[in-house]
Image (tube, grey):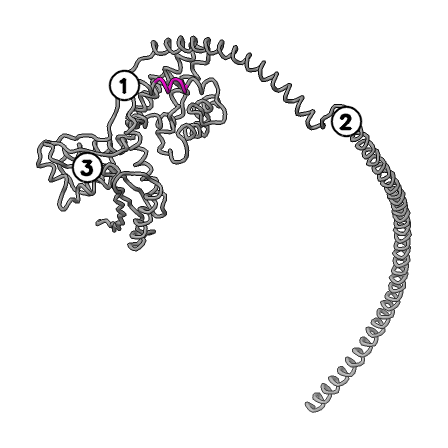
Amino acid sequence: MELIWVIGILAAAVVGWLVGLLFRGMTLTKKAREAQETAAKLIREAEDRKKEIFLEAKEDSVKVKSDAEAENRQRRTEINRQEKKLNQKVENLDRKVEAFERRERTLTQKEQEIENGLARVEKLKQEQRQQIETIAGMTSVEAKEYLLKAVEDETRNALAQRMRQVESQLKAEADENARVVLAEALQRCASEVATEGTVSVVALPSDEMKGRLIGREGRNIRALESATGVDLIVDDTPEAVTLSCFDPVRRQIARIALEKLIKDGRIHPGRIEDVVEKATKEVEANIQVEGEQLAYRSGVVGLHPEIIKTLGRLRYRFSYGQNMLSHSYEVAQLSAALATEIGADVEIARTAGLLHDLGKATGQEGEGPHAMVGANILRRLGMAPVIIEAVASHHGEADTIGIYGFIISAADAISSARPGARQESVDDYLRRVQTLENIANSFTGVEKSFAIQAGREVRILVKPTEVDDLAALRLARDIASKVEEGLTYPGQIKVTVIRETRSVDYAK
């Protein structure tokens, strides 16, 4: 019984499996038909789309071809128009060239006719000259010289007579006016005459101080002379030493430094350098004060600060022994007085008189006359052209000279010509020692130079990085040769070249 149930179950299972296979096959067949129909539909749609795209592409190609043909036609038309225009220009140019050629031929022909006419005129002039010479019995050159000589003699005689009359009259009037003007100016301005030498004496508390100033093996005196450029003379004069230098500024710095060292008591090379530096600053401050006081006393306002400082340096400048600061003040007052007498601008005359020797305070005399140096400084600092012209021309070194140039020149001469105001020998000495220093400074590698021993020795400090020991020897020989060639002096001049190397460090 159980076997029958098992067989029945198996049979039922087989029948179910067969029925499932049959149903599945029918389902697959239906899907296949549907897929075929879908594929056929898509193929038809693709064919239709392909035809549409082909038609659109064909239409686009036709449109592009049409546009290209239209553009080509337009360009061809423009090219034809430009070609026609160019042909017209070429034709016009050809016509102009032909016209120019015709004009050139006409001008050439007229030029030839003119030359022929000039030749005929020259021939007629020669014939007429020959006829005149035959009638007069002399050549044209002789006749011209005769007429010119006759007119010249007659004119010269008349002019000479007239010039003598005018000269006598003007001279008499000018002399009288000059006497009046100068007398009035001199009465309104009176100043003291003061001269300055080239040495200064410094008092010592005792003769023992001389040994301390000299130092061991002379190191202190060498350091002081090297730092200041001043010759320190220690002689038998009791309780005094002498400072000698042609430059009053250096001498003043050395005097102040020496007085400070004597008062302080600490005298050694390092201390000397510090004191000299402080003395230099003190002198610079005094220079500023002197310039301001000079401008105030002279009544000149509105000057550039650099001009004020340069004027202050005149306190330590001397010409022929005459102090330049006092001289400038005196010339300013005299110029104002002269301008008042002749009716000129008093302020311009006073300012030009005050600044007329500005070039002497700069130490640039080697660059030209001091009048031109001063004028260049004023021009650079924007002073009025009339003042610049007066300063530049007060010694007659400029191309022109105006009324204020004459006023300054006269005032300068009045101030300088007073008895005892100037000493010729002092100025010659100053010029010689300044030239000596300028010669030394003109060489490459020279840091600074000092003329000492009254101009009998020049000491040159060189830059150790640029001049070695052998170059220092050659430099001394070259400077000595140039001094022999370019300077006139009595006796001999010693040339000393100093090369010093310092190494400095700090302990912290």
Which residue is label 3 attached to?
Answer: 232
Graded by Cα atoms within 10 Å as few (under 14), some (14 to 19) or many (20 or more), the crowding at tag 3 reads many
| Figure quadrant of residue 159 | top right
- Using the image, determine if residue 473 lies above or below residue 377: below
Q: Which residues are magenta?
A: 408-414
Badge 2 marks a residue whose secondary structure is helix
Which residue is label 1 attached to?
Answer: 193
Graded by Cα atoms within 10 Å as few (under 14), some (14 to 19) or many (20 or more), the crowding at tag 1 reads some
Badge 3 marks a residue whose secondary structure is strand
Q: Is residue 219 left or right of residue 387?
A: left
Image coords of residue 100 (percent x, y):
86, 41
Determine contact: label 1, label 3, CB under 8 Å. no
Badge 1 marks a residue whose secondary structure is loop
Earlier in the chain: of badge 2 and badge 1, it is 2
Q: CA distance from mark 2 to mark 3?
A: 93 Å
Q: Which quarter of the image is occupied by the N terminus? A: bottom right
Q: Give amino acid for label 2.
A: Thr
Image coords of residue 313 (percent x, y):
32, 28
Graded by Cα atoms within 10 Å as few (under 14), some (14 to 19) or many (20 or more), the crowding at tag 2 reads few
Which residue is label 2 attached to?
Answer: 134
Q: CA distance from mark 2 to mark 1?
A: 80 Å
Image coords of residue 321 (percent x, y):
28, 26
